[in-house]
Image (spheres, rainbow, N blue to C red):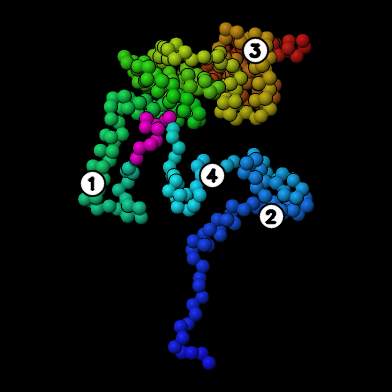
Amino acid sequence: MTDPFSTPRVHEESRPEEHSETAEEEQNEPAVKTCPECSGRIVHDEAQAETHCQDCGRVLESDQIDRGPEWRAFDSREKKNKSRVGAPQTQQLHDRGLSTVIDWRDEDAYGRSLSSRQREKMQRLRKWDERFRTKNDRERNLKHALGEINRMASALGCPDPIRETTSVLYRRALENDMIRGRSIEGMATAALYAGSRLENAPRTLDEVAAVSRVDKLEIERAYRYLADELELEMAPTHPEAYIARFASQLGCPDETERRSRELTQAAVEAGVHSGRNPVGIAAAALYAAAKLTNQDVIQPELAEIASVSEVTIRNRYPEILEAADEVSSG
């Protein structure tokens, strides 16, 4: 018989932490349990960044990315204390992304609207937070310039490496006191033009001037001053650096782009590019390649994309075809 006064046995349920730890361990395990060659045990070698079979040595994955932290933790408490969140540092922000940002929406964490008193409080906090983020004229200058750089880079479709390089160039100019007596927009535009050339993804002066708040002449002066003072080693721009972007905007197939690169290399070997605008050489090579591959590319559209005249394309592309014939026959 069952004792009515005895305490009923309660089955212990597994805690949520155990379920989460087990699920995390199962997720971290490799998808392949056994070796497909010998059905041996699969092990992961963190030192070599590879997954291999312990029995036959067959490598299943190599060059794996270590997504863990760079510090060491020996227990759960130490691991929790050393955990970090947030985006990495960037040169595109004047404070390198280390300061706080108060959201402009007057909502709490659950998406509910704040009361009028709380909204006034958050508005005051935003105002003082903005003031503390830029403490002096130097930081306000840098904040304005980096904002202009991001605006122009977004309009030109520049990737992050160009933006980072441009931000570093402007920071160096500001540290060397080169901005005094010159416009912030002009120096920021010159830094963007120089940064795109340093990253081998050049933009033409006309393209940069089209999205800038200053004229082309001021950009040229600021660029020469920036390159001289910072001693930037600027190699002459190769015409091939423009072909991929022009071909992408025209929607040309890979065959046309490959043929235009061959024509550009032949023109450089023959010296056709000497003393000529590299943008015009690239546009003419792309037009000649389109003719050879039976692609419908019209000169006015290509001239507008490359920011050159139709006369330049008409005069250059016969010379490029002739140079390609001489290189192939020689």
Q: Can residue 294 be seen in this snapshot?
A: no
Report the mark closest to the observer, 3 or 1: 1
Residue type at the position of mark 2: Lys
Residue identifier under label 3 = 268
Q: Are marks 2 and 3 in contact (CB under 8 Å)?
A: no
Identify the disc placed on residue 68: 4
* Residue 263: quarter of image: top right
Report the mark closest to the observer, 2 or 1: 2
Residue identifier under label 1 = 121
Q: CA distance from mark 1 to mark 4?
A: 39 Å
Location of residue 244 in the rendering, given as x and y in whole percent from the top left corner? 60, 25
Residue type at the position of mark 3: Val
Viewer-side residue, 236 vs 141: 141
Q: Are marks 2 and 4 in contact (CB under 8 Å)?
A: no
Report the mark closest to the observer, 4 or 3: 4
Element under disc 1: helix
- The magenta segment is 91-100
Q: CA distance from mark 2 to mark 4?
A: 22 Å
Which circle's residue, 2 or 3, is located before the other in the chain? 2
Which circle's residue, 4 or 3, is located before the other in the chain? 4
Q: CA distance from mark 2 to mark 1?
A: 56 Å
Q: CA distance from mark 3 to mark 1?
A: 65 Å
Element under disc 3: helix
Residue at point 46%, 86% (across, down): 6
Location of residue 8 in the rendering, given as x and y in whole percent from the top left corner? 47, 82
Q: Measured along the vertical axis of the image, is residue 9 above or below residue 71?
A: below
Location of residue 33 in the rendering, given as x and y in whole percent from the top left corner? 69, 55
Which circle's residue, 2 or 4, is located before the other in the chain? 2
